Image: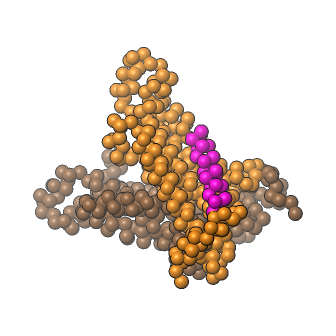
Amino acid sequence: MNYFQQGLTWLNDPLNWTNPGGLLDRLGEHLVISSWAVLLGCIVGWPIGIWLGHRGRGGGVVLIVANLTLAIPTLALLTILPLTPLGFGKPPVVVALAVFAVPPLLANAYTGLRQIDPETREAATGMGLSGGQLLRRVELPLSVPYLAAGLRTAAVQVVATAALAAFVNGGGLGEIISAGFGIGMSNGGGGQIVAGGIVVALLALLVEGLLAVAQRLVTPRGLRTTRRRRQVPAAVPAG
Amino acid sequence: MPAWPLAAPADDGPGNPWFSWRYVQDNAGELLTNLEQHASLTARAVIIALIVAVPLAVAAYWIRPLTGPILALSGILYTIPSLALLALVAPAVGTTSDTSVLIALVLYALLVLVRNSLAGLTQVPGEVREAATGMGYGKFGRLWRIELPLALPGVITGLRLATVSTVALVTVGGIIGRGGLGDMILGGFQNNFYKAEIMTASILCVALALVLDLILAGIGRMLTPWTKVRQS
């Protein structure tokens, strides 16, 4: 029995795409949930990271936050948050995913501002720039590559983790997989499981590829060569 | 029948508390069994991954043209969501044992370990390597006596990262009922939102990760006493 073949057969049936609750519906849900989560993560992670980086302290806090969230299973947050006043449906899923989007955004924003040559900073201050002007005209432009790298890591991770929302009936492409497991391997669910797996994996790779291109585009040419080595803490599989 | 409540109250009263010692006492057996399963899956995954990762890292270190492909492949595999990987492995391997979960866990742990071991190996200073060669070490002797010990901090960092993330990842195995504490988190959710079960299993999960991390950090300090001196 070749499950991969069955998966392709399942994908080849147009009805599986256009049915209510089919692939297209789920893809839409997946992207909506992911976008909100990344947006929420940016709103929280970037200002804190930029501020800490600007002031030049709190590196320890950033590290602790990043390491601590590693230990929290996504599944735990996904099941706990719907039972809080957030209620059921999409909001708890978005918040849960955003929690895991914050560390890469925060850490990269912090690193981005800290890696700026202190002499550049001094020169800017010497030219009479105030703290706010220094941030807006010097520090932020120079840390754009890092902000972009953080966004890419966070977005890919959120898109990958959003598949887990199916555990709590939160929608998204994971529903295809969990429905397949629901049908059962012996009753022909195997094809659907594999099909769901293929689509989720492809989506994650596609987002990664697109954002890699975008990251290259926003990086000024002069900074591109130094970007070979990522100083980002290694991205960690979404759990 | 009413649909989902729009907003569940923060506390449903005494009937369904977030935490209760009563629950822990009454279900100590089940909790321990799942904790054990969780820890055993984590340990097996990380140990298998370590056994495969170090030779791979050495291969990439010795044969430079292999470095690019190995890192690129690890990057691609890294991007594939855990649930998708499990979905691709489980139908082929079957869900009657935890083998499929183990395979997915090993793959993820492998990538973290290869990258960090390789990073540890490449940061061995060139002078050190030359000095070792000058002292008459062969390729294997140099690797075993000089380069691997010096790469140990990198390997241990990788081991800690891999262990902590594996503990969290095991819960995903709950979709086929092979997720250790993840089974209980999911079970509590499906069993009328049994908060105490969800919370206790989650706390145990985080605690397991932190304890294992501390143990590995301790072992790391014992094995690499020189890093302590350098820091202070």
Q: Is residue A113 above or below residue A87?
A: above
Q: Within the image, what quadrant is residue A20 found in?
A: bottom right
Residue at 32% in and 58% down: B68
A224 left or right of A237?
left
Chain letter, colour orange in render: A
Q: For the N terminus of chain A, which image quadrant?
A: bottom right
**Residue B138 placed where, x, y %?**
16, 66
Residue B210 visible, this angle: no
**Residue B132 placed where, x, y %?**
17, 58
- Residue A25 lies in the magenta stretch: yes
**Residue B147 placed where, x, y %?**
25, 59
Q: Is residue A38 above or below residue A188?
A: above
> What span is colored magenta in the figure?
A23-44
How many tags in the picture? Answer: 0
- Residue A210 lies in the magenta stretch: no
How are the colours assigned in the image?
by chain
Chain B: colour as depicted: brown
Residue at 53% in and 66% down: A198
Q: For the C terminus of chain A, which image quadrant?
A: bottom right
In the image, B129 versus B70, the foreground residue is B70
Q: Within the image, what quadrant is residue A163 found in?
A: bottom right
In the image, A221 versus A14, the foreground residue is A14
**Residue B134 placed where, x, y %?**
12, 58
Residue at 51% in and 61% down: A202
A212 left or right of A222?
right
Helix, strand or loop for the magenta stretch, by majority = helix
Residue B5 visible, this angle: yes
In the image, A74 versus B150, the foreground residue is A74
